[in-house]
Amino acid sequence: MNLTEQMTQLARQAKAASRELAKLTTAEKNACLLAMGTALELNADAIQQANALDLEFGAGHGLSAAMLDRLKLDDKRIAGMAKGLREVAALPDPVGKILDERIRPNGLKLQKISTPIGVVVIIYESRPNVTADAASLCFKSGNATILRGGKEALNSNRIIAKTLIDAGKIAHRQFPEHAIQVVPTPDREAIPILLSLTQYVDLCMPRGGESLIRAVADCSKVPVIKHYKGVCHVFVDADADLKMAEEIVFNAKVQRPGVCNAAETLLVDQAVAKTFLPQMAQKLAARNVKFFTDAATREILAPSILNLQPAAEQNWFTEYNDYVLNVRVVDGVKTAIDHINHYGSAHSDSIVTQSEAHAKQFLAEVDSAAVYWNASTRFTDGGEFGMGAEIGISTDKIGARGPMGLDELTSYKWLGLGHGQIRN
């Protein structure tokens, strides 16, 4: 069987499974998810043996210590996957909700009902725990999923998926075994082939670095939900509580700098820049943060801060995922908004201010998936939003936007309930 035939079979099986999966009740889905969680814990030794092969492969192919850490599955991480499955089981079922209902003058009753999307392809890197997370969210929302992890995690991903499938089949006789599938080959050509099968595949969600996401979006013929990068901003307004601003900026930058909702640029109103910036910069510098700055910032900080470099145009567009921060002094809230809408990635941006008028202007005019008033950008996360779990974050405007939980993994259809109506 060649690669095209292999991917076509995978997709065809997923489409058939999605039809069967849509028939499962909430109780049946939850029973399967709970069984899957228990099975992961009972199968921990075999999972770690498979993971050891991946760790050996990764070390031999030059993966960094940080990447090897992301790849590793220990008892704690396996327990975390099991816990995640149980949490998904406890969430409300997103399928079958009445989203809208109306009765037309002729008596025709119309209902807008949430439905599964169908077949979802998820492409991701390194972390094999994503296999369980993504499979459980898709399963609960009634979607068949095809998982394509990195080649460095192939053994781990295979055994996790097999553990989930075997547990599901034991928990429910009608469990569709192709509801969860792993692409069995590391061949990169498999992705464009799979994403050309529009008659079977309904949606693709890539998770990883910008280069991976762009490559997927460029080759896909099915819709792709994505965010390319997180160039997030905090703007300290002239009317900010500066102590609050200091805590928010510090949290947004250094609490976990390697994630997409960490701040990459600090904008400070010129009215408070001389008061705010020296102490803020000292606090960040103590955590080894380096700065790319405009001339006004350097003029204020140059005597006391050593890690200052002039910001080039490209810096303002850059997601560092590191202890690096752009800093610019701006003239008012409108200038800050213009900067964010030009250089930002429409991910997460925050204003710190006591001025309700400035806050409302910022919230209305910043064109991002999540916009905050007096809060850190680090809250853009499914768990923090009370969704219970998250399959990714979208900066698209059509379909899901922001953190994507179970509800964002559904579509809808209209039901027309009549008693003989015909259109004149």
Image (cartoon, helix red, strand yellow):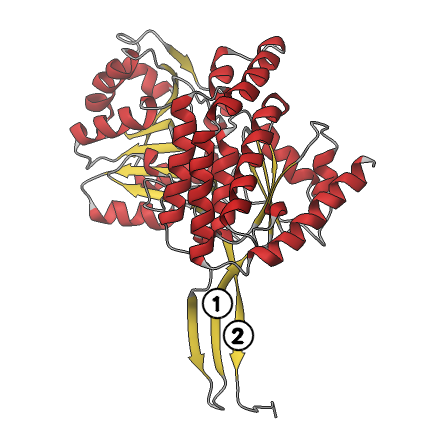
Relative to 236, is 373 above or below?
Answer: below
* Residue 90 seen in the figure: yes
- Residue 327, numbered label: none
- Residue 415, numbered label: 2
How far across and down, in percent of the image, does residue 336 sit? 35, 37
Q: Amino acid at mark 1?
A: Ile
- Residue lying farthest right? 1
Between residue 331 and residue 33, name the one nearer to us: 33
Q: What residue do we see at 63% from left, 11% from top?
A: 61
Q: Secondary structure at mark 1?
A: strand
Q: What residue do we see at 43% from left, 38% from top?
A: 37
Between residue 300 and residue 192, name the one nearer to us: 192
* Residue 221 seen in the figure: no
Relative to 409, is 133 above or below?
Answer: above
Q: Amino acid at mark 2?
A: Leu
Residues at discs 2 and 1 in contact (Cβ within 8 Å): yes
Q: Of marks 2 and 1, which one's residue comes earlier in the chain? A: 1
Is the N terminus in the top left, top right, bottom left or bottom right quadrant? Answer: top right
Task: Tell me the crowding category of disc 2: few under 14, some 14 to 19, or many 20 or more residues within 10 angstroms, Cα based.
Answer: few
Is the C terminus in the top left, top right, bottom left or bottom right quadrant? Answer: bottom right
Relative to 257, is 412 above or below?
Answer: below
Q: What residue do we see at 73% from left, 48% from top?
A: 197
How far across and down, in percent of the image, does residue 282 sit? 25, 13
Location of residue 59 (image quadrant): top right
Between residue 370 and residue 342, name the one nearer to us: 370
The residue labelled by disc 1 is 113
Tell me if 80 is positioned left or right of 219 in this view: left
How far across and down, in percent of the image, does residue 181 sit? 62, 40
Between residue 190 and residue 169, name the one nearer to us: 169
Location of residue 288 (image quadrant): top left
